Image (spheres, helix red, strand yellow):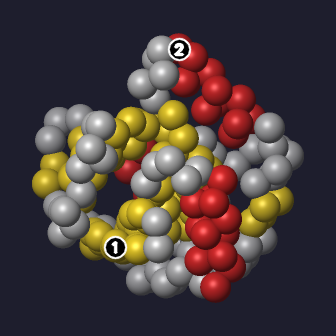
Amino acid sequence: MSVTNDEVWFTGSPIELRVSKHVYACWLQHRQMKPNDTEQFGVLIGSRNEDESSIWINKCTTPQRGDISHRTRFTMKDLFHQKTITKEFKESNGELGYIGTWHTHPQDVPTPSIIDLNDWDQCALRNPDRQLVFVIIGNKQVNIYIKNKEQIEMVMKEIDT
């Protein structure tokens, strides 16, 4: 993992993955550090180069009033998330778009649940034209999963405390 003034780079995959510092800070701010904290989540908005060897995560949404959140599960229902994707796509002339989703787990080192894996499969079926990125933020580690067809690659970063 490298850090520039504006980006956090995740390495360890053939795909170069860059996350804006603003998005990374948002993820860390929403961790489930207290026993009653509920899962936090949102969509990822970014871009990729043509051969998909580089992915940039520029923005993310956060839970909204119409969403449902519990300690170990959530339902993203609020239309705000899709409206934000559409707005960013239009304002960037198609350069920015849906990249995937992020959510928290109340674990130090997060592990995807069967619900997560099934959801990622459904997202991939709805978006067969692109690689998707799924992020799980634990209390001490951030895991990023890159899904391309049937394969999932993981890169991680321990959180500096």
Residue wearing tag 1: 154
Spot occupied by residue 156 in the image (x, y as percentages of width and height)? 30, 71
Q: Which mark is residue 52?
A: none
Number of on-image labels: 2
Amino acid type of disc 2? Glu
Amino acid type of disc 1? Met
Q: Nearer the viewer, residue 29 or 70?
A: 70
Q: Are marks 1 and 2 in contact (CB under 8 Å)?
A: no
Q: Nearer the viewer, residue 126 or 37?
A: 126
Q: Is residue 56 above or below residue 145?
A: above
Residue wearing tag 2: 91
Residue found 71% across the figure and 29% down from its top: 83
Q: Residue furthest right?
A: 66
Spot occupied by residue 151 in the image (x, y as percentages of width and height)? 41, 74
Q: Is residue 94 above or below residue 125?
A: above
Identify the image quadrant of the N terminus: bottom left
Q: Quadrant of residue 146?
A: bottom left
Q: How far apart are the two marked residues, 1 and 2, measured between alpha carbons? A: 31 Å
Spot occupied by residue 129 in the image (x, y as percentages of width and height)? 50, 47
Describe the element under mark 2 as helix, strand or loop: helix
For label 2, count other residues whose C-alpha is less than 10 Å away and answer few (under 14), some (14-19) or many (20+).
few
Mark 1 or mark 2: name the one nearer the start of the chain. Answer: 2
Describe the element under mark 1 as helix, strand or loop: strand
